[in-house]
Image (tube, helix red, strand yellow):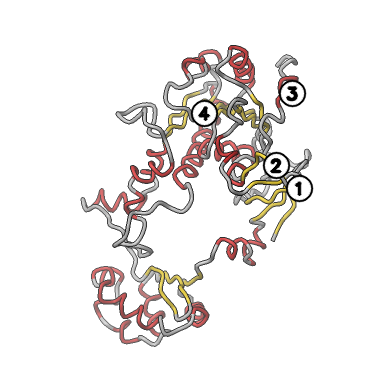
Amino acid sequence: MMAEFNASSETPTALGDIFVLDLSRILAGPTATQLLGDFGATIIKVENPKTGGDDTRGWGPNFAKNPDGTSTDLSAYFMAANRNKQSIAVDISTQEGQAIIHQLAARADIIIENYKPDGLVKYGLDHKSLMKAHPSVVYCSISGFGQTGPNRDQPGYDLMAQGFGGVMSLTGDPDGVPTKVGVGIADVMCGMYATIGILAALRHRDKTGEGQHIDLSLVDASMAWLINEGTNYLTSGNAPIRRGNAHPNIVPYDAFAASDGHILVAVGNDSQFARFCDVIGRSDLGAEDKYKTNSGRIEHRETLIPQLRETLAKLTKAEILEKLQSVKVPVGPIHTVDEALNSDQATARGTIVDVAADGIDGGNIQLLANPLKLSRTPVQYRSAPPRCGQDTDSILETLKTPK
């Protein structure tokens, strides 16, 4: 299940010469900087010593343990987005702290922050101030609603972004309460968009010497990944509705109850539907003109789906899997998290990594791997998520050396 990764100075990295000053916390910003760190960038994470660092350090109940069994400040939530980073404890409200940030900014290729708009102006650490002093820097600001607009000053939380951006209206049982995605997907996707924007801005910087400001919000990103449901509305003028696990544009595409649980069926085209009907003993449905085409099945889903549910409910999950796989109709299980992470596929793909962690009970931490498989510049897991401020002294020592 688990793969061990030991970073080697001989292994090339895509971003090994990039220095990132990370003023972000919680999830969106740290997701972006962790991705950059996985590609080899040096990430200096700035944390407030007065508050104990990144808020998520205290988001239990699960924590890495000290050898004596006591909890560290490494919560599972924090560890999910903070490997391959160094932590420096700096109080940016003080002149001394601001001076340290300016010194680090002078060496940075990238600065990323997720304070409220204009939240860093009073410290002289906003994008206008730092880009004036360092015009080649790529400065990325992440906020709930962006640097402009009537909601710019509202706080940004994943739940609020999912609600405001529309995806919650599409998620959940059709007759139930609108439901957020089970993980902080608005934060994570915003972090991924941030990484893409940063890499594009770096490309421009390398060609022209010009840095630039990236303005990104959780809500903007959430609306962008409405994808087909967003364009369904723009094309038709009709607001999409919740369909549970069903698909607005493909039928049948849903979770179905078997006699011993639930299973997923995704019939992607008309020939698959004909084979699906044959193999489950419902050739009569496949022969009906109103069901032969996907457009017909969409129009008549209210009569088709109950008949399919009745038939599939008489079969076991294993029987449905075997039957549909034998005729190449997409079908699959609904794994719990432990089943997914312990599956043969996860093992083969190295989905879990074991990262050495000094001072931690057992000497290592298990993390979810980066999914990217780069053939020339592979992802590296150089260091476990840091304790708050653990690298302060060594980072300050490097600042004594001229750039």
Kindly report which numbered mark, 1 or 3, lies closer to the viewer in this rendering: 1
Residue type at mark 2 is Ala
Residue 67: where, in percent of width, then height?
A: 77, 46
Please, is residue 74 above or below residue 391 in the view?
A: below
- Point 35% across, 86% down: residue: 283
- Circle on res. 393: 3
Residue 306: where, in percent of width, then height?
A: 30, 77
Please, is residue 290 above or below residue 69 in the view?
A: below
Please, is residue 366 above or below residue 312 in the view?
A: above
Q: Which of marks 1 and 3 is nearer the N terminus?
A: 1
| Residues at marks 2 and 3, CA–CA distance in whole angstroms | 18 Å
| Residues at marks 1 and 2, CA–CA distance in whole angstroms | 13 Å
Residue type at mark 3 is Asp
| Residues at marks 4 and 2, CA–CA distance in whole angstroms | 22 Å
Q: Quadrant of residue 329?
A: bottom left
For the residue labelled by badge 4, is the local secondary structure a helix, a strand or a loop?
strand
Residue tagged by mark 1? 361
For the residue labelled by badge 1, is the local secondary structure a helix, a strand or a loop?
loop
Residue type at mark 4 is Glu
For the residue labelled by badge 3, is the local secondary structure a helix, a strand or a loop?
helix
| Residues at marks 4 and 1, CA–CA distance in whole angstroms | 32 Å
In this rendered view, identify the residue nearer to me: 346 or 63.
63
Residue tagged by mark 2? 384
Residue type at mark 1 is Asp
Residue tagged by mark 4? 113
- Point 62% across, 44% down: residue: 75
Q: Earlier in the sequence, mark 4 or mark 1?
A: 4
In this rendered view, identify the residue nearer to me: 375 or 234.
234
Q: Which of marks 2 and 3 is nearer the N terminus?
A: 2
Residue 194: where, in percent of width, then height?
A: 49, 36
Is mark 2 in CB contact (under 8 Å) with mark 3? no
Badge 4 crowding class, 10 Å Cα cut-off, few under 14, some 14 to 19, many 20 or more, is many
